[in-house]
Amino acid sequence: MATVDLKEVKKVYPSGVEAVKGVSIAIPDKELCVLVGPSGCGKSTLLRMIAGLETISAGTVAIDGKVVNAIGPTERDIAMVFQNYALYPHMKVYDNMAYGLRNRGTPKDEIDSRVRSTAKVLELSALLDRRPRELSGGQRQRVAMGRAIVRNPKVFLFDEPLSNLDAKLRGQMRVEIKNLQRALGVTSVYVTHDQLEAMTLADILVVMNAGLVEQTGAPLDIYEKPASIFVASFIGAPPMNLLALTGSSSGPILADGTAIGFAPPETPAVTLGFRPEDADVTFNAEALPGALVLPATVEAVEPVGAESFLHCAAAGSRIIVRVSGRATAKPGDQLRVVAKAEKLHWFDQAGKRVD
Amino acid sequence: MAPQLAITLVFFYWPAGQALYQSMLRQDPFGLRTKFVWFANFRKVLADPAYLNSIQVTVVFSLATAIVAMGVALLLAVMAEKAVRGKGLYRTLLIWPYAVAPAIAGMLWLFLFNPSIGSLAYLLRSLGIAWDPLLNGTHAMILLVSAAAWKQISYNFLFFVAGLQAVPKTLIEAAAMDGAGETKRFWTIVFPLLAPTTFFLLVVNTVYALFDTFGIVHAVTGGGPGKATETLVYKVYNDGFVNLILGDSAAQSVILMAIVIALTAIQFRYVERKVHYG
């Protein structure tokens, strides 16, 4: 029903702090865009600028092709789910959901039917006469969602909506949000610092760092081809293993002197990385052409159930290797970590990806 | 015996007992003859049109003072919240009047609005208003309410500022996104959430207007013109110490004591159980 276009959006606070340093994102209709990044990267500020709760210092925000810089939050026809839910404590659940419709002069019987049908979708029908303080965290979260959905706005904004829930509920709500968003087909912007949430929810994933966009794309594309060291270490849990390279007469070698064993990319790279699941361990000593082989010492084993993570010391750094099932290695074991050449990621001096 | 108990006995229970005893005595102005009359003083006081007038004056005065003091304070607090620069200075200046003694505050207003020498009275007259608090009872009441409310605004302001700061900002933002304009947000979100503060202040202001305004009444109007601004507290003083009808005065102060006890009970019952949201 609406597209959201950000063009070179900047936010400079009166104190001179530049929270957002020029961000451009185009969100197509009906898609869910996730802004992810560490705290202080400007993602929440960006969301609040789309909402109209913060003024825009430079650039434009357009909703449905119409620039809304000068339009207040009241007239933007956007709904937001806040991190602390921001339910009106003195109103019953019903009135919380009806508030936005009443403000827009919707007829009474239409308000009633819309609130009740939304409540039904979110399984809130039995709670309509309660006040927010009588609800559990998960129920409050649903009411906050209901309040946004019932208005049928052009755009949904989510500001870390799941961070106050326990892990199990978070997983459930994540799926529910995704299904609801698809079913309703409302363009959405979702802010989170949790990369798992970001990966699973996003149609478009935007990784932000220090007020700038590091990479935009489909979640799996970003996972498979991180554009920078920052993205590589931020997306994926456990994070990508990164090893520093130094030059030598025979080409780059690892910082501790280990040879790479095959030809590196033509552009000079100073860091190489591989994901924990792209490596394996072996106790054998046979030659493995076309692979990075690192002698390593196991320092710790983390069994998770379906998989185990081996924390190893190799090439002067800590690396993590994922092995499926029960790990045979024990702390103190000497072994070799093997990563196939095509699974390696290379980064240059500026931390950018090199292919 | 605990010293605080001794102090309470000497300075509270003993005079209160004396007042109760006095209220049942009839005495000549020179204190030469005294007669125990049971509740005759109460019957006389409660049947006295002047006393009933005084009750009416007190109700009007207290309500008007509480409403004006709270209304203005709330308006100022909301504006102080919106101030971008000089918030601290603005607040400090608004808190100062609280440090002014009631009698001094009364004198200030008296001078400003005195029909012959008051500068603001002159201004009012030049605007075509026949301002005369010395002869017009309504004008005297307006002046009194203004002076009493002015004194109390600071206190209310302080509480309202604290109350406003306690309203979560995200609620106001959520309401804005729900399409509520600024005025609507205030009346549907902020004001209901201020209810505990407002109720507390209502009790405090009523008690203040009832019992704490003797100095202002004495300084500004002395209960006049006629008996247009003679509040209950002022009448106790007038009957007892000016007219020397000690029995009547004592009976009136016993009635006041009953009112204080009732108000305190209300305060404990409702204010202590403040509405908590969250």
Image (cartoon, rainbow, N blue to C red):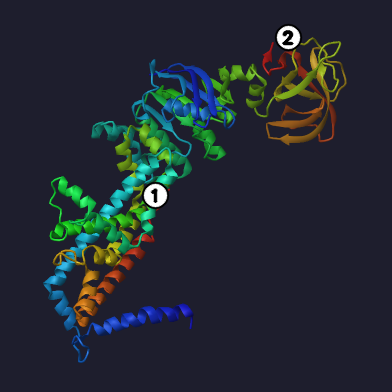
Q: Secondary structure at mark 2?
A: loop
Quadrant of the snapshot with the N terminus of chain A: top left
Q: Give above or below for B106 relative to A269.
A: below
Residue B114 in the image: x percent, y percent?
A: 20, 57
The three-letter code of the residue at mark 1 reads Leu
Residue A88 in the image: x percent, y percent?
A: 38, 42
How crowded pointer 1 is (Cα within 10 Å; few <14, some 14-19, many 20+) is rated as few
Residue A5 in the image: x percent, y percent?
A: 45, 17
Using the image, name the chain to which the residue with label 1 belongs.
B
**Residue in the picture at 48% in, 80% down:** B3
Residue closest to the far front = B117
Label at residue A267 = 2
Q: Quadrant of residue A249?
A: top right
Using the image, name the chain to which the residue with label 2 belongs.
A
**Residue in the picture at 43% in, 37% down:** A142
Query: Relative to the observer, which residue lies in front, B169 or B141?
Result: B141
Residue tagged by mark 1? B93
Q: Give above or below for A269 relative to A100.
A: above
Q: Secondary structure at mark 1?
A: helix
Tell me the distance, in whole angstroms, between the alpha carbons under discs 2 and 1. 68 Å
